[in-house]
Image (spheres, grey):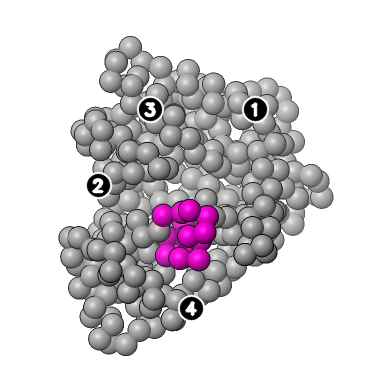
Amino acid sequence: MGSVIQLKKEINNSYLDLKNSVEDKLALVDERIISKLSSNVDLVHKMTEYHLGTGGKRLRALLTLGSAKLSGYNKGGRDINLAACVELIHAATLMHDDVIDNSEIRRGKKTLNSIWGNQSSILVGDYLLSRCFEMMVEDGNLEILKLLSSTSTEIAQGEVLQLQHKGEIDILEETYFKITSSKTAALFSAATKVGAILGGKDAKYKEALEFYGKNIGLTFQIADDTLDYNSNLKLFGKEIGNDFFEGKVTLPIILLYQKVSNSEKDLLKNLFNKKIRDKDELNHVLNLIKEKNIIKDCYKKADHFINLASNALSIFEESKEKTILKNLTTFSIERNF
């Protein structure tokens, strides 16, 4: 147990290194978000204020700021504005996600839709996206406007693709990664590429940071999916099984389905076709996952993307910023929060 706790400390440090390196600008990002979400409509004000109070890692904003710093951007506050923009795109997608998934809890607190209803959540998510487009236009860079607007389109398509395959226990890994690339990795990729654009970097550097962000995003999603079935992390007090209870077919279930007998395949199909699943059924699935070493298999898949992300940074000269971003590749999979 002692070694696990030490690992937790090391993991957190890699995230905190990035946060500390841009701490002054991150505070300004939060201020920018608050100012952009101000509204004369009382319900909009209440809902956005509540959302801001739920916290979050601000990882996409941190990647924007860190990538801009790595790329030599030091001309003003455009990185702050665009980091806030990226965070607002993320926030809007979360609001829409919670409606689609009928989620009641996020980050340990009630979701907006569970308090104010689905209609209000959708409309406030749209309000956030409209604010994002205002910020993109204010920046004035057509390359960034095109990048972030096309990223918003890609995220929406990923949502629809996921909905199209909802409950399909025999979904192909290829389809899973296509959904993940659109829903999650696309925004990570855009965040890091924005940094290179701000720094005035050549195409090869833009592509390198874009590729880095994409693979960090894929690793991050694999970690999210795996954490939900990793009973070993109970010692950290993390609730598991949320994806299972919502009927989401994620990587651990896809890999498990490939390994079990035909009778267990039928059982898994029946489970994910049900409207409601209980704790006993979750425990059965957790036992199967442990028996078939599925958590280890997920981490092996993630290792591939970690290596790709890390290698993408080799084009940059050695610097503190490069080391921080490189260390973040392991944080994305080893984190426990």
Q: Position of residue 274 (x, y in %)?
A: 18, 65
Say which residue appears at 68% left-offset and 58% top-offset.
6
- Mark 2 vs 1, N-terminal side: 1
Q: Position of residue 191 (x, y in %)?
A: 55, 41
Say which residue appears at 34% left-offset and 78% top-offset.
257
User: Label for residue 102?
Assistant: 2
Mark 4 or 1, which is nearer the eye?
4
Residue located farthest toward the top when viewing the structure as drawn? 40
Q: Which class describes the residues within 10 Å of circle 3: few (<14), some (14-19), or many (20+)?
A: some
- Mark 4 vs 1, N-terminal side: 1
- Dividing the picture into quadrants, the one containing residue 219 is bottom right
User: Label for residue 25?
Assistant: 1
- Mark 3 vs 2, N-terminal side: 3
Separation (CA) of disc 2 from disc 1:
35 Å
Q: Which of 113 and 321 is in front in this view?
A: 113
Separation (CA) of disc 1 from disc 3:
23 Å
Q: Nearer the viewer, residue 203 or 275?
A: 275
Q: Which amino acid does label 1 sit on?
A: Lys
